[in-house]
Amino acid sequence: MLVLLIIFSVLFLLFLVTLFNVYIYAEFVEELSLVIKVAFLEFKILPQTKKKKPKKSKKKKKKSGKDNKEPEKKPEKKVSPLDYFKQKGLSGIINIIKTVAKFAVDSFKDLFRKITVTYFSLDFKIAGDDAADSAIKYGRYCSAVFPALRAIFGVVKCEDYDININPDFSDEPKTTVYVKTIAKIRICSIITFVLSKAFSALRIYLKAKPKSKKENKL
């Protein structure tokens, strides 16, 4: 009797855990910041904290007639996401946005329907070589970003959003991107989605699996 009580208690606790929401906090200014919270637990996914390397003890080298100094390696410059976008160019960015939107809607449509975006903010300033170039880029970005967001928000429930896309006509124009998202989903929704996809994959595998000779004879 005591064993059954313990088992039912554990199952009940697991059931209560599945009712918790998973909160996702994402923010992009110059780098992507991603934090996931479940109840009182918090997991910082991005940016990853760098581990400090232990300092190596410097050994004194004996002086020789010629100094054999190795050329110092220059630290590699890290490419920020904003620099990556600039390298890809306008058409590359538009293709990335369209690809992400299509992948999200097609592959995770069932899961996205269970996600609630409590807040979404996009502040995008577009700069070109001159005022005319800024206006042209502004039109092209709008033609890519708004349909992509419309496709995503057609599946995902969004409670509050603030979208600002403007050309930068200032004396020193600069392209800047600021994105902030707060979303939530129940753990039970994630579990049911994973199980349904696993069963679908198993069904496809069993259908594709070659039959044995005994089964063919029957």
Image (cartoon, rainbow, N blue to C red):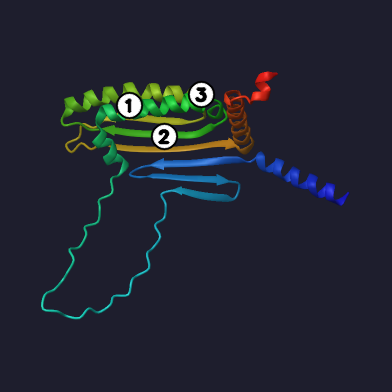
Mark 1 lies on a secondary structure that is helix
Task: Tell me the mark number nearer the camera, choosing from 3 and 2.
Answer: 3
Type of amino acid at the residue the image marks with label 2: Ser
Find the distance from the CA under tag 1 to the CA under tag 3.
21 Å
Front: mark 1 or 3:
1
Mark 1 vs mark 2, CA separation in Å: 21 Å
Q: Secondary structure at mark 2?
A: strand
Question: The disc labelled 1 sits on which kind of residue?
Answer: Asn
Find residue 7 and report its horizontal and vertical position in percent: 79, 47
Q: Position of residue 93 (x, y in %)?
A: 30, 30
The earlier-in-sequence mark between 3 and 2 is 2
Residue closer to the observer: 209 or 160:
209
User: Where on the picture, by quarter, is residue 26?
Assistant: top left
Mark closer to the observer (1, 2):
1
Tell me the distance, in whole angstroms, between the alpha carbons under discs 3 and 2. 18 Å
Q: Amino acid at mark 3?
A: Val
Which residue bears the numbered disc 1? Answer: 95
Q: Position of residue 197 (x, y in %)?
A: 58, 30
Q: Which mark is residue 121?
A: 2
Residue located 23% across and 38% down the image: 174
- Residue that numbered label 3 is attached to: 155
